[in-house]
Amino acid sequence: MRLAKLEERENFRNIWVMAEWSSGRIQPVTLELVGAARPLADARRSEVWTVVLGTGIADRQLNELIACGSDIVLVVDDPAFTNFVDETEARVLCALIEKHRPESVLCGATTRGRALIPRVAVQTNTGLTADCTQLAIDPENGNLLQTRPAFGGNLMATIYCANFRPQMATVRPRVMSARPPDASRRGRVIRGTLPTVSAAACKRVLEVFHSSEPGVNLADARFIVAGGRGVKGKEGFNLLRRFATMVGGAVGASRATVDAGWIPYAHQVGQTGQTVQSQVYLACGISGQIQHLVGMQSCDCIIAIDKNPDTSMMKLADITVVGDLFEVLPELIRQVSIT
Amino acid sequence: MRIVVCIKQVPATNDAVIDPETKRIVREGVQAILNPFDTYAIEEAVRLRARLGGGVEVLAISMGPPRAEAVLREAVALGADRGILLSHRAFGGSDTWATSYVLSQAIRTIGNVDLVICGKQAVDGDTAQVGPGIAAHLNWPQAALVSAVREVSTQHLVVVRMHEDGHDVCELSLPAVLTVVKGINVPRVPSLKGVLAARKSEIPVWTPEMIGADPAKIGLDGSPTRVVRTAPPPPRNKESLRFTGTAEVCAGGLLRELRKRSLL
């Protein structure tokens, strides 16, 4: 809501984390957000609250939220949250926000979070910053300084929301670090603060499919093995898949390979695909069009394998291998399998 | 029934120039294009019009400076029936909250709209917030990251939504808002007829008063968020490491390096 007077800021307290509930469990990004929220709350001498909307939530997971830094875990456990219905979750979250008045709300910049939180921000009449990579707080007034990449990572913008509360931000997975669990930490689980949750009548989830294809989840991957035109075809991607599976990674792709039908669109990295921020991005035969680079240039360590040492990707990369990927990748697979 | 497609004109490159005063992007003097995701939104609207049979009108709307008229003409060339430009000094500096408010007010003003389609996100801001924001302002249901429309009638839709690890299928009642991804269709190339229609098309310009917009909710002053600082991204480590030689030597060296950095 818009503050009529800045003193009204004092009516809003605590840093909230909206838990990412999917596939029947609380996802790791939640613990990363709790880790990010802890120092912000400490600076304000306030609490970290984690809100979990799910069903059949394991106590072990709720305790883990406390061990990793939450003071309060607010749980609404209801079958209405079995599948992702934006409208139901938004309505419940808005009601909780109006009741408890948090100062800030953090949510994962996941497919669910990026659909849900803009709806909540509009309905609670407040500001939202997408895909933050850095969060700081003004200890005096609680203003959240939210830094995010813009223009495909070519610019970092710092944004704040001084006259509205709560302040809302989404944060990409794997950007913040979870704190190691401390089993002696004390916290409280509050259940069922809402008497009834009525499912939205305007939407029904009919079916849910988890991809059987390995290596499709680019957002959560620590290690991405990505291919471009140099991969030469579908068979070439099988080689990338084999290595990705060995290192527990996902498979990315350039637009050209997706358009050629070598690999499904879900793997596309770049301007018209996904923006990724993995620890390792291994680019195999990707020349590095600007539209591709903007989707991956924030990865921690970029490795490029290419016969041509002068491509844009080879210039961007932290580690380069000048060579034929059809020789280097099988050799990587061989060497990893014997160690 | 009307289908509204919300589109945006974006800079053709990502070489951003920032106004030191407003901290917003300088759009003058930079070549501008239709946001790539919006071509899929336009195409899907045109296809749904055909699937629904007669009596469906496809409108493209865009908020932006006067020159954003170009993307509305492009939308007409691609099959939209007409375009409306929301352009006024008072709209300037709108963040995603204010932008989605302005677009929702335009949709209310157009009337008889049952479906709004947006691209997944604009490639300059990359927020993906405006589509769900419009749905929230209108209090309509939404489906983000739609990769297929399986069923459509004047009452409902069955759509496929992409998730990180798969997809789901959901049914929505209309009116509703969709955001669409690239995989949903293959946009057509403008036909000669379309290009001629685009050239002749009247693109009216709507102002805040014409859409009944509350002046306190638009532009820089109506926006909850504010850019306080912009800076170049932290530089990447310029010292790059290069392996050459046989595949065996390169692979060995790379694996050693990855293990040394605890990346494997």
Image (spheres, rainbow, N blue to C red):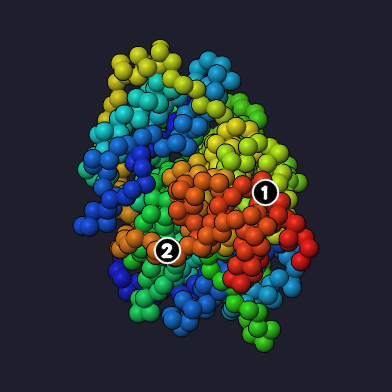
Foreground residue among A186 and B153:
A186
Visible in this render: residue A288?
yes
Going by the numbered disc 1, the residue's amino acid type is: Glu
Mark 2 surroundings within 10 Å by alpha-carbon count, few (fewer than 14), some (14 through 19), many (20 or more): few
The percent coordinates of residue A71 (x first, y second) are: 58, 79
Q: Residue at x 51, y 73 (%)?
A: A37
- Rendered location of residue A174, percent (x, y): 57, 64
Q: Residue at x 49, y 56 (%)?
A: A317
Q: Secondary structure at mark 2?
A: loop
Which residue has dot 1 on it?
Answer: A327
Q: Where is the C terminus of chain B found, in terms of image quarters? A: bottom right
Label 1 sits on a secondary structure element that is helix
Q: CA distance from mark 1 to mark 2?
A: 27 Å
* Rendered position, B93 above or below A33: above
Residue that appears at 58% across and 26% down: B154
Mark 1 falls within which chain? A
Vertical comparison of A64 with A240: above or below: below
- Residue furthest to the bottom in view is A184
- Chain bearing mark 2: B
Label 1 neighbour load within 10 Å: few <14, some 14-19, many 20+: some
Whether discs 1 and 2 lie on one chain: the answer is: no
Residue named by callout 2: B238
Can you tell which quarter of the image residue B80 is in? top left
Residue at the spot 38% in from the left edge and 68% down from the top edge:
A145
Kindly give the residue lying farthest to the front in the view shown.
Answer: B245
The type of residue carrying mark 2 is: Lys
Is B16 situated left or right of A167 in this image?
A: left
Residue lying farthest to the top in this orientation: B193
Nearest to viewer (mark 1 / mark 2): 1
Where in the figure is residue A256, as x and y percent of width and height?
A: 55, 36
Determine which quarter of the picture holds residue B211.
top left
Query: Looking at this view, is B18 or A229 the one in front?
Result: A229
